[in-house]
Image (spheres, rainbow, N blue to C red):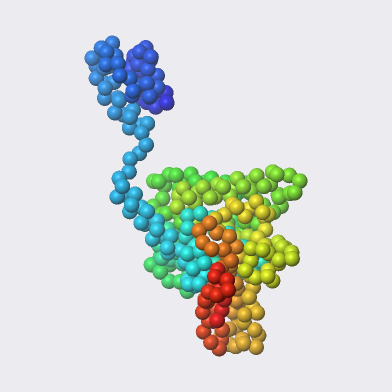
Amino acid sequence: MNLRTLLPSLADDIHRALEAAGITTAQEFLFNQDFQLYHQFPESVATQIRELKAQVAERVSAPATRGDELFHREEEKERAREACLCGVDELDGLLGGFGKYGVIEIAGDKRSGKTGIVLQVVLRHLALYPDHTALWLDVGGEFTVERAADILQLNPGIGSETALDRLSITTCFDVATAHRALEELRISLGNKNEAPHRMRFLVVDPLTPLFAPILSATSSQGHAVMMTFMRQLGSLARTYALTGLVTNASVQSLPQNPYSAFSTTTTKPALGPSFTFLTDDTVWLSDAQNLLPKEKQDKKTMGTEVFIAEVFRSRSTFSKTWCAFVIRNGISLERFLLPDRPTTLIEDEDSPHYWTCE
């Protein structure tokens, strides 16, 4: 790096003296072994140049961090990662929680509980960690504060009262607005002195309307825009230790979806095959009301919706694992229990990565 760029406030006579000796960059200055060089300068200038070496070395060197400080940072990150749970043990067990530093896709048909799970994970975490924040990119314009407040009432914590204050909602109906939101977040996260809180979640709900209109079989431009956005999202997640949660719609997959544990699954995540590899995990949600027949329903099960969650793809765990769970009244996430008898999920003997109800 040029010395004038590195030290613009340095006296001009010192810059000229060094340039006259053929030294214009930081490398030439630091690694010059000609001790006779200093005799060419007046004593006052030579003394300043000797002191200047330490300043230049500090400017061009990577910042040093003690090993114990790094260890404590990693411990704190691990504790925060483990606390990102939805509250249903079987569902949390599919991925080992929803707090990994990467991008998790929650996909499924309409009204399959995608937004419900994401809300549950984010709000539970904010209620437990009063110094953490989240950014929610509301693409569909369907986020409701009332629903979030109802979920918080069911998940008390030391940060419950301020949880909604720490959840930032940004409405964006096009890719350009979403890109600006990510860039503003990157600048904010890069400025360590800007805010005392730590950003923990970045949600895009739903992702599909941003890219589905611009994807085309005859042009690669839409795919390039989508890949750029997702790579930027993944980079933010890994660089600043946060979790990206994106929800995705469904399209047909006939005669069946080969990634599903069920032969009756005839849909798959939208946005094409290239999107499959832009996330770290894909969790698929589907309706499972057949697990709770109408003749089994009573007052206890009114307002109850049963869903299946299965792992289509993951970089860190098995695929084709699944579990059933319940969303009650649109706000409460619960384990799936048949009205007449308890339900547990056990490993199928014939297929070691499948889970069945018994």
Q: Position of residue 88 (x, y in %)?
A: 49, 72
Q: Residue at 59% of width from left, 52% of height from top?
A: 278
- Residue nearest the viewer, comparing 281 with 192: 281
Residue 119 visible here: no
Residue situated furthest front in the rendering: 350
Q: Residue at 54% of width from left, 63% of height from top?
A: 318
Q: Position of residue 153 (x, y in %)?
A: 47, 73
**From what the image shows, is residue 45 above or below residue 140?**
above
Q: Residue at 43% of width from left, 71% of height from top?
A: 156
- Residue nearest the viewer, comparing 333 with 75: 75
**From what the image shows, is residue 58 above or below residue 303?**
above
Residue 32 visible here: yes
Position of the C terminus by quadrant: bottom right
- Residue nearest the viewer, comparing 28 with 160: 28
- Residue nearest the viewer, comparing 120 with 169: 120
Q: Residue at 56% of width from left, 47% of height from top?
A: 231
Q: Position of residue 291 (x, y in %)?
A: 62, 80
Q: Position of residue 184 (x, y in %)?
A: 52, 46
